[in-house]
Amino acid sequence: MKGGKPMNVSYSTTPKSEKLMDMRLNLQWNDIDWRKVEENVNRMQTRITKAVIQGKWNLIKRLQYLLTHSFYAKLLAVRAICQNKGKRTAGIDGKKWLTPQAKMNAALDLSDKNYKATPSRRVYIDKPGKKEKRPLSIPTMYDRAMQALYAFALNPIAEATADTTSFGFRKNRSAQDACQQAFICLSKKNSAQWILEGDIKGCFDNINHEWLLANIQMDKSILKQFLKAGFIYKRNLNTTKAGTPQGGIISPILANMTLDGIEKAIAAKYYTSRSGKTDKKYDHKKINFVRYADDFIVTAESEETVKEISELIRLFLKERGLELSENKTLISHIDDGFDFLGWNFRKYSGKLLIKPSKKSIDKITQKISDKIKDAKTWKQEELIYDLNPIITGWSNYHQSVVSKYIFSKLDDIVWNMLQKWARRRHPNKANIWITNKYWHCEGSRKRVFSTEKNILKFFSDTKIVRHTALKLDKNPYLDIEYFDLRRYRLRKLKTPNKFETIGAEIIDCFCV
């Protein structure tokens, strides 16, 4: 006898853990019910969100542990990194998970037991319109999957504790939401006149590791591995003493959590007095804060107030190892205008207009020009195939602002570029011959750059649609129906023809 049980006795029933392991080993990647996987992970994330709101931090730790050790979460983490743009870019180990079997094995092997992060591969990429280059760290596939796994457990906390007017790298939020919030703050006659344009110097590269380890609610040993992994450049190992590596999946969440609190710091000084009542010296409606990643604006009724807030933010950032960029942090008057997220905000005779910024227009013009120059020997079909996503992406981004004139102007610019491209290919042909070869009638348009298989898109074909303001108090893990309905309505506004046959009961079911 040992432990109250006879020795050498075989039991007919298999332990539950062994059955679960058999199920995992026999499961094939292509047979996975992803809807069930996502529901399981989302259910756990919702529980974490509720626990954050209730302030139950011991419960949060237990729920995070369950989520990061969940097989469903591991499957979803592997799928997340195998679906993004970097799936074919390997780290220093050269490994890629391209086959179903490799992905399945990766999910089975993913574990925090004795986990040690591998140094990232460091590359430098060009900054648009600038001579200096941006450092980019490329972790191994395994490290990326671990970051994605722990991001699932950290993101509900980040969402529940975030500044309400933070929009970058957040679930169900976009640059267009930030633009609309800025419009709300500045569009009225009595709105603030002065704006602080803030930019944080090397945000991802300089965040204080000690602050992160002391304030980020996740497994400290795992977080330390992410932060201290180092990087390889020119076959030399370099340590990381500060910052979160650009290219890491969890880095945007860590950066957001580092910057969250600026809005509350401003509110503590300007929105309330010691008695708890609104301070009459400051108008809540005129002092506003809008942030997208490390770019932000602050509005105020006077230049002096803006300078005060700028100093307050400097002190806030200093504790976290960050500082404002002297060159990019500016104070502007609304009548002179300012640029934010690729748009220009300016009042003309008291009316606020938001247009694509000159820098953004110059960038897209240069990008198309470079693409056409690279296509000297390409077939027309190949050039159209490469240009269409560029045109569609840029026009969709600026679809919600005053862009109609700019769209038409860009169409003319692209037309002239393509004319030069075509003439260069046929220097001995007449202009009418060249035009007839590459431009054809399509619908009501007499001259469209097209082939039998494909048509070059026009910027001006994009419909101008006013963006619907986001309800700032909604949480993506608790208010799922709100975001589903909002997503449906936005898509319907932008592409109404696709939704004409969908019954009104779809909306009604969300509104119940």
Image (cartoon, rainbow, N blue to C red):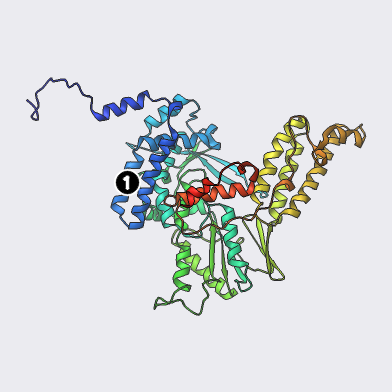
Depth check: give the residue in front, 80 or 472.
472
| Residue at 60% in and 47% down | 492
Depth check: give the residue in front, 392 or 369.
392
User: Percent position (x, y) of residue 293?
Assistant: 53, 54
Q: Which residue is mark 1?
A: 63
Depth check: give the residue in front, 295 or 393.
393
| Residue at 42% in and 39% down | 38
* Residue 329 visible within the image: no
Question: Residue 341 lies in what quarter of the image?
Answer: bottom right
* Element type where label 1 sits in the image: helix
Q: Quadrant of the N terminus?
A: top left
User: Percent position (x, y) of residue 117?
Assistant: 41, 39
- Say above or below: 395 vs 329: above
- Say above or below: 301 vs 242: below
* Residue 349 visible within the image: yes
Give, as a three-letter code, the residue at label 1: Leu
| Residue at 49% in and 29% down | 96
| Residue at 80% in and 47% down | 412
State left or right for residue 200 relative to residue 408.
left
User: Percent position (x, y) of residue 90?
Assistant: 51, 32
- Say above or below: 236 vs 211: above
Question: Residue 264 lies in what quarter of the image?
Answer: bottom left
State left or right for residue 254 relative to residue 389.
left
User: Percent position (x, y) of residue 279?
Assistant: 47, 78
